[in-house]
Amino acid sequence: MRPVGLRLRRLGAVLMAAAAIMSSGCVTTSPERLPPLDRRFYENLSSAELRAEFLLLRPSKRQAFLERKGLWAEWKRLTAVERAGVEDGEVAVGFLAFAAHMAWGRPADVKLIESGTREVTYEIFIRCTSGPRTGDHVRQSMDCDGTSSERQIAVENGLVIELRYLD
């Protein structure tokens, strides 16, 4: 068993190293500080643990991480028009559902409807229309601190087949 003083010195050294790495600009601790495309990928990671891991990565390591999680392959499948839509926050009928997720984040609500051999997923996205988060997509309307609107897409076989503005 190591003396307490030695363990404390090692802990201090580890904390100082972590602080140095974070302050060097190599990693970020806030998703708001991510570049726009990285932020979109961050929002589409499936768990809080993966999002926390992504934040700690150096920018040069993020693509490899996304490749391991399958998101980079999804991004590469998007057409030039879909990628432009993602950048502009616009989605159209015929886009891959992944383009909608990259443009607007994860849906606030999802409902699967099965009828015979068809499966259609209806996804609702909430967008802040006033307040400090105007233009942001959120998981619940209360996060807007103002007004919000809802959009719904219908997805079949991975493609957006319908787009509705619910408000």
Image: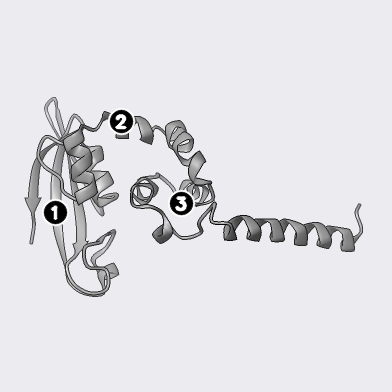
Q: CA distance from mark 3 to mark 1?
A: 25 Å
91 shown above or below 34 = above
Q: Is residue 163 left or right of residue 134?
A: left
Furthest residue toward front: 24
Assign a secondary structure to mark 2. helix
Residues at circles 3 and 1 in contact by the CB criterion of under 8 Å: no
Which residue is more in the foreground, 113 or 144?
A: 144
* Residue at the image point whose x is 80% and y is 57% from the top: 10
For disc 3, the marked residue is 48
In front: label 2 or label 1:
2
Q: Inspect the image, locate mark 2, and give the three-letter code of the amino acid beneath it.
A: Lys
Q: Earlier in the sequence, mark 2 or mark 1?
A: 2
Q: Position of residue 125 (x, y in %)?
A: 20, 54
Image disc number at residue 136: none
Q: Earlier in the sequence, mark 2 or mark 3?
A: 3
Estimate the x, y position of residue 137 in percent, counting from the top left: 25, 58
Q: Which residue is mark 2?
A: 76
**Mark sitting on residue 151:** 1
Q: Is residue 90 left or right of residue 74?
A: left
User: What separation in Å lies between label 2 and label 3 (alpha carbons)?
Assistant: 24 Å
